[in-house]
Image: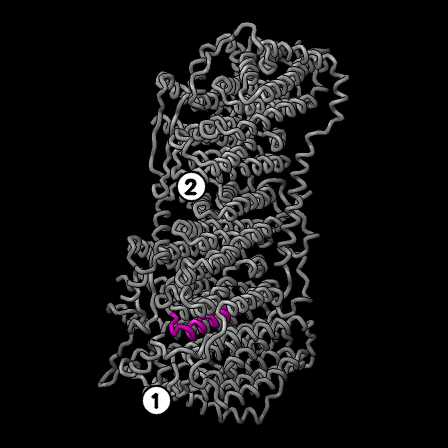
Amino acid sequence: MTGILVVLPVVGPLLAAAALLAWPARPLLRRVTGLAVSGLVFVTAICLLAVVRSGTVLTVRIGGWAAVVAIRFAVDVFTGLMLCAVALVVLGCLASAAGTGQDRHPFFVPLALVLAAGANGALLTVDLFNLFVLIEVMLVPSYVLLALRGQARDVRAGRVYVATNLLASTLLLAGVGLLYGVHGSVQLNELVGAARESSRVAAAGGVVLVALAVKSAVVPVHAWLPRSYSEAPPVVVALFSGLLTKVGLYALIRVFAVLYGGSADHQWVIGAAALASMLVGVLGAVGEHSMRRVLSFHMVSQIGYVLLGLALFTHESLAAAIFYLVQYILVKTALFLCTAAVHADRGTDRLVALGGLAMTRPVLAAAFAGAALSLAGLPPFSGFLAKFLLIKAAAAGGAWVAVAVALGVSLLTLTSMLKVWGSVFWGLPGAARPAATGWRPQAWATLPALTLAVATLLLGLAGQQLLILSEAAATGLTNPTEYLAAVLR
Amino acid sequence: MILAFVLAWQVGLAATVPALSRRLGRNVGYPLAAGYAVAAALLLTRLPAILDDDVVQISWRWLPSLDVSAALRMDALSLIFALVVLGVGGLIMAYTPRYLSGSGQHITLYVSLTLFAGAMLGLVFANDLLLLFVFWELTSILSFVLIGQNQPAATRPAVHALLVTSGGGLALLAGFVILMVSLGTSDISRILAQPERLASGPAAAASALILLAVFTKSAQVPFHFWLPGAMIAITPVSAYLHAATMVKAGIYLAMRFSALFGDRRPWSIALIGVGLATAVLGAFLALRQHDLKALLAYSTVSQLGLLIGVIGVGTPESDAAAILYTVAHALFKATLFMLVGIIDHEAGSRDLRELSGLRREMPVTSTMTALAAMSLAGLPPTIGFVGKEAIFEALSEAPGGVWLSWTGTALAVLASVLTFAYAARLVYGVFAGPPRQRGLYEPSWSFLAPAAVAAVAATVAGPLVGLLGPLVVRAANNARPQGEPAELAFWHGFTVALLLSALTVVFGMLLFTFRTRTDRMFLEAPTARPFVSYFDRGYGWLLGFGDRVAAMARAEGPAPFLIMPLLAVLLLGAAATALVGPVSRPPGSLTRPGDLVVLALLVMVIGGLVVARSLLATISLTGLVGLILSVWFVTVGAPDVAVTLLLVEVLTTIVMMLVLRQRPGEPVRRERARPSGAAAVLAAGVGVIAAAGTAALTGRRELSLPARYYLERAEPVTGGHNIVNVILVDFRALDTLGEAVVLSVVALGLAAVLDTAGATGRARAGPPDADLVFGFAYRVLAPVMLLISAYLFARGHEEVGGGFIGALVAGTAVGLGHLAHAGSSVPPLGWLRGRPLLVSGLLLSLTVGLAPVVVGRPFLAPGKLPLPGPLSLSSGVLFDLGVYLMVLALVVSAVRRLGSPGGRRTEAPS
Amino acid sequence: MTAAALLVGLLTAAGVFLVLRGSQLRLIIGFILLGHAVNVLLLSAGVLRWRVPAFADGGLDRADPLPQAFTLTAIVISFGITIYLLGLLRTGGAEASVIEPDPADDDGPTNRPTEVRDRDET
């Protein structure tokens, strides 16, 4: 039974996508199918999480082949948490796409489902080459989604996106190849601590990490993300933001933890990249002029926070990083979905052209405010707890520079969110008129964002459960024996 | 329990506002006021216990894994602040309905105010650092909402206020984290009970950070500028948040943590220094204001400074004085704000230069204002007088040297003199003199009553201070358990403090009398504006700097975005070279003579490719590179790879030709290359790293475990002879499924992009002539190729071949057809459509993969499908067929989409 | 330095050079070359000492089949992406530099900061 649960997050969406393509369905049927399958995956993820939360690790050998050669999917708490978050993001984005009418293209839902399948697979797999393949399964639909509106500008922004990701994929593949060359295996369980013991493995793993860093938009290889995300359709950006870079980040954490875990020689590199990402990202966000661009730069900055937890590599800091990552996925998706609603309403997300939305769209404003405060790390939202955990872990580790940077960046984050808030929700109504299509956003456009914003509030007020799970997940990273034992079973 | 109930009560009140508001409109303030009174009464039921040095507390597990609990605790200090919050809050709630206009939305205002009161209560009750911080930030956020809502001009001051206070809040968080990390607990009462446990290093850092929070929240120099800005909010908000309560949060925090840091000299010095400097500066600035609200705002800054300064003294008497004066200030300052609001409301102005002689028409308002101003100025018999006496006394007896106590006292007296002067100016300016406006009336009693109650209370509390005494004394002991201060009394006899009070009055009167002369002097002095403008300049600079940082991500074209990743590779290569050091020679010979031939050929071809200008040459040379590599792949024992690569190259070339054929202008146009020096250097560097990496990291190990397994066990396990194919179809079928999905998505993508984008390639003038020879050759070749394709597919498991290779061959046939027929007529195999192929392939592969799951075996497990008779079909073949269909789907889509003449396709999407 | 390593280096350098040189078609060809480079790298990861095709009865010195399978998968994936990129060539995006943003569409690119001033700054 667990066997099918483990592969369902990959197979379910793929099957649904194929079915939707086979029978050219009405938009309503597409929507319902998309939401139903994503809901099913969410329920599956919850079930998986419930099974593994006690510390057991579920594994499936695809095809049932011998352990030495089989591709394996494994679910530990970290995986389970990420699967849940990703499923929520997909649900929210599909609902929002339906609400804002962005899913009109007959391929939208199938492509989103394939993307989700790839993302889920990338979270599940233990095999690095399979990771590469599944990341491609995730990326190629994203290439198409970017250009689906068919506007020249999309295609141009898409070119930056495709080129950078292609380079990163090439690099990832090269890294995997080099790991095989040095070590004779591409399975994570065979590679535990290998980089600590051999500098050649460390070098090969470094290639993998650089590739994943590009995909996660870590400074200094971040610029592609704000460039390309800021011109894509907002719901698509929400989907990308919740899935693509986060899967890259997840893989980065997993690979680093398994290969290099606890190796002080390598941690400082991650730490430096983390601090640079936090600073550069937030400064860019402060200086930007449209909601999508501000939020895209924040992605860079927030990735820095998560990496900070990885760099410190204590149990406490890893738990903080995982808590941060999971809640942040929801927060950022909420913010992008708010942007999508604004965009659907006013036809633009440029700050200078907007204003006064707090009066006309109070619920949307409330959802945005909640998510924005959470992003800035203000209580009582989940972002606060996350930031607190991280700062506490940094302080416990004596990383005072990191504490100072984290706090300063938090204030700058607030600054930029206030800039957005002041321009978009307060102030005089801007020059933007309602969208030319005449389509008026309805509650559906706001509801997904609001739901996620409420989720971040609840996670802030009652974060204990997520905290326990994050700690269990961190145990899986600092002490991979259980993960391995299960994988070998 | 009562504490939690009171908090829940406030939230409940806020929750009822929308419903009540529908019926009552603005009058919803009255039931809220009653609600505040109920809460206050509930807390007062515990007064006897509190006076008995007992505490009320309750605690829930909140984040047990962090040892953080939702702990509430009320001692006398908390109770006094809570009563201020609820008492003043109730008055403000009763005041607000008449202040607001009858129409309009007030729900947000009332909800925010009520929640704010709850947050303040939570702040003074919190017995856990984290919980305290949560409430602390909540007050900042609600203050932001209350300042900024409803008018565009308020956004900037609201942002100032929030940035300054939450900046301080972050400092507070840092301070608390230091305490938690070094003490291992976040329980405030436990932390405060043992100040000696805190080492001096963390103590210094934590105290400095907490002070930063105090100074920002309580608007101390140089952070004070947000408070006058916040006066853009409506008067009830100013009166409640920015005079009586929120700014007192800093006072509360400073008092609370005096138990921990009070014995440290820097703590005292910082409090006294910053506080008294603020007191003088604020009073001085208040004196220059014409706008009554601005005057009161600077007055608040000044009075808060005085309080902060007194807290720094650190004697039991000083704590008592600070607590008493906190209550006094809340009372009279809220009153003054309310009265100014009334004046503004009635006279339509709050500018001292426009108001005059209101005492005739508004005698009650005048009297009440005068009473509150007496409190402010420190005149008997008000509570302001008692409080200021206590402050003078505490300062003049401050420990730490005569120098400190005299300077402190002098500054306090100076601030008080200025305070007296502006208080007098306020009363005199508004009410005395000739009346200028006609038709003014005393406001309705319901408007005036809340202010009047507070004004009278502030006055009679002076003589009756003895009633407050026990609670204040107890609270002072809570703040710093160092013995009981002297009881508070209205009359102390002829003391130094009384002398200082008298001095204050005398100098204040002088300052007021000669105001025309002093005003000129004061107005020439530097103003408060520098602080705001420094902040704004910094903010603007920050935005500009951010804009420059963001500019990196605005470049056009992919190349600028690839440079950093490539540089990262260079860096990694350099670092790895340094770390790995020299590597051993690999055993055996990894290079054969043939390799060198291939290398030499490639050097030439690639050299040509790099310098080639014409597109045709570029495409041909690219194909040639693939061809040579295919040959090399054969020599290294990878025939499947070789054949696949060859076919892929052929197909890629066909598609390129098809694409470029639709862009007739293109092939002859010579592309202008970008300056290539830097690109060449970077490319060479990355190339060297790639070569070095490959050389250093490959070729040195024995056969890997999986390789050994495959070579020995693959055939027995699967029955397949071609191990590479077996790996693809069986062992790593998931990879294969993934790549087939990739191809399917590309097929979809081509359909989507080219259908919606309206391909811009221009159609040729007329249908091109089909190449007769080519066409004929094709008609002969196509069936043969299809046969080969089927054969290659079928033998995949045994020899070179399989789904990919077979489909690529078939695809080549389709592609050649399009080339031969040049898009004019429907070529053979033109009936093939991408989407049905794709869908059937995907469904087939997934079904084959899922079938074993139904019978409880793993996903993609191999199996046999029984056919009629003795035959059976292995699942691998079906899976491979699915792959075949998907690969073919891509090729068909590509040649159909890209090979058709430009322009929007009119036929139904396939 | 083995011949294979030199091959990788050569293909990488040429690929990077072409990728950095602006035009879309060169970008695609650059990535094709980079793909080749990785394929050679993957095969060398399987140790090129053994070069006999990996059939079940090949005896000693049979090549490691796993990197070959990797390479096959990689080739097909890059083929797909190459085709997609070629498809993008056919769309308006190829003429990036000559297309001005549509003034009617308010969602224009924000790469001209002088034009887009925030009201916060004023």
Residue holding disc 1: C58
Amino acid found under the numbered disc labelled 1: Gly
Task: Count the labels in the image.
Answer: 2
Please say whether residue B267 is visible from this viewpoint: yes
Q: Are marks 1 and 2 in contact (CB under 8 Å)?
A: no
Residue holding disc 2: B181
From mark 1 to mark 2, how far is it between C-alphas? 65 Å
| Label 1: which secondary element | loop
- In the rendered structure, does residue A293 fall within the stretch colored magenta? no
- In the rendered structure, does residue A178 fall within the stretch colored magenta? yes
Q: Are marks 1 and 2 on the same chain?
A: no
Vertical placement of B252 versus A24: above or below?
Answer: above
Q: Residue at x 46, y 57 (%)?
A: A267
- Quadrant (top left/top right/bottom left/bottom right) for the C terminus of chain A: bottom left
Most extreme residue toward the left, as rendered?
B870
Vertical placement of B789 versus A50: above or below?
Answer: below
Start and end of the magenta stretch?
A: A165-186
Q: Residues within 10 Å of mark 2 (few under 14, many from 20)?
A: some
Q: Residue at x 37, y 85 (%)?
A: C54
Q: Residues within 10 Å of mark 1 (few under 14, many from 20)?
A: few
Most extreme residue toward the top, as rendered?
B493
Q: In the drawing, does residue B445 fall left or right of residue B616? A: left
- Dot 2: chain letter: B
Q: Position of residue A234 (x, y in %)?
A: 53, 55
Please say whether residue B795 is visible from this viewpoint: no
- Secondary structure mostly seen in magenta is helix
